[in-house]
Image (tube, helix red, strand yellow):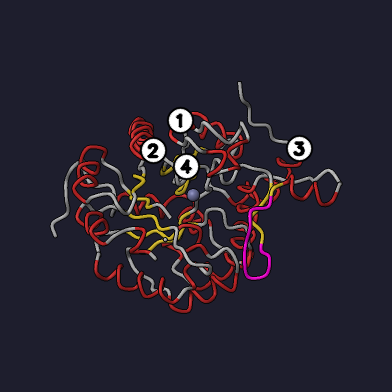
Amino acid sequence: MRNVQLTEFDLEIYEREIRPLLPEQVFDAHCHLLINQFHPRLAETLPLALDPLLNEVDLPWLEAWWRALFPGIEVSGMLMGFPTLDVDMAGENGMVARSANEKGWPFALLVRPEMPAVDLERDIQSLNPSVLKPAQASITDMLPEEQIALADKYGLAVMLHVSKPRGMADAENLDDITRLIRDYPHCQFILAHCGRCFIPPNMDDALKRLPAAENLWLDTSAVCDIGVFLSLFSRYDRSRILFGTDLVTAAAFRGSYVRLGMSWHVCTDAMVARAGGMAAKSTFAAYESLCALCYAVRFLGLSEAERWDLFFQNAAQLYRAGAALPRGEALPS
Ligand SMILES: [Zn+2]
């Protein structure tokens, strides 16, 4: 029987830095289920998942993590499978769809670029996802335009984990997104991890040219840098920012995502303990991200209403407005 254990130290961080800023209800716009049998080479493709607390993530296990990390708060979310290179997509998508439908929550379908549009359309009709989540590459390499056109036809969102070393600060990515939001107005584009800007110089450069649009959103998942959030919240449309955790596998380890020069890295407790020899007093990466986010929220003086929007309402609006049409009903094109 697995149990999520928080130390006094974890709880202290939560109570002091996070809890005072959270509403009673939170929507996690970026979280993953991961069932080992659908990832035959997991040890190779996602070493973090070797930790027994971070694999076999079915919905009850994700909820166990939410209950532990957000005591007393009601959490729901948009569920996705985990896009490792070896994932059995049909298997994991089916499991995610069943779990989300049980709750009436939105979920994402993992898609590969080589998937024929006719197969994807069949899956959209039979599984009824709200989001398409392409495997990781340029935006249109990872999600061919015929797949984007389907998302547009059905009013779905697509969640983009943009490639290239500087994420959304890359000029080609900015050109792509500027064109796509215009050409596919019924498709909601979500840029995961603040457009994969984990460090302030990338967020700053992205914000110089990132268009604000009804159908363009960013999620906060896995970003652990206060500067990124300070820039984003002071310079972008706050009604288009979604809170997400990236739980379980990619955010429930003890450690953080840290900046080293112009790059960023997973840094686990074990790496630091090995280097320092001292018992590391680390907390969960999900808490590191929340501490940075809450610091920026406090520093910029976001009102209670703005915090409600960030942690719940923006996502509710997204999934009501764009991506949660009645089953099988396509938007008029
Ligand atoms: Zn993720």
Mark 4 nearby-residue class (10 Å; few <14, some 14–19, many ≥20): many
Residue at the image position 71 percent from the left and 40 percent from the top? 11
C-alpha gap between disc 3 and disc 2: 39 Å
Q: Which residue is mark 2?
A: 88
Q: Residue furthest top?
A: 1
Q: What segment is highlighted magenta in the picture?
A: 259-267
Does mark 4's beta carbon lie closer than 8 Å to ligand 1?
Answer: yes
SS type, badge 3: helix
Answer whether residue 27 is visible to the viewer in this image.
no
C-alpha gap between disc 3 and disc 4: 27 Å
- 227 or 183: which is nearer to us? 183
Q: Which label sits in the foreground, 4 or 2?
A: 2
Q: Decide: marks 3, 2 in contact (CB < 8 A)?
A: no
List x then y, in percent, for residue 173. Answer: 41, 71
Q: Residue furthest left?
A: 332
Which mark, residue 32?
A: 4
SS type, badge 4: strand
Q: Amino acid at mark 3?
A: Glu
The C terminus: image quadrant: bottom left
List x then y, in percent, for residue 187. Answer: 28, 59
Residue at the image position 80 percent from the left and 47 percent from the top? 274
Q: Which residue is mark 3?
A: 8
Q: Which residue is mark 1?
A: 37
Looking at the image, tell me whether mark 2 or mark 1 is earlier in sequence order: 1
Mark 1 nearby-residue class (10 Å; few <14, some 14–19, many ≥20): few
C-alpha gap between disc 1 and disc 4: 15 Å
- Magenta stretch, main secondary structure class: strand
Q: Which label sits in the foreground, 1 or 3?
A: 1
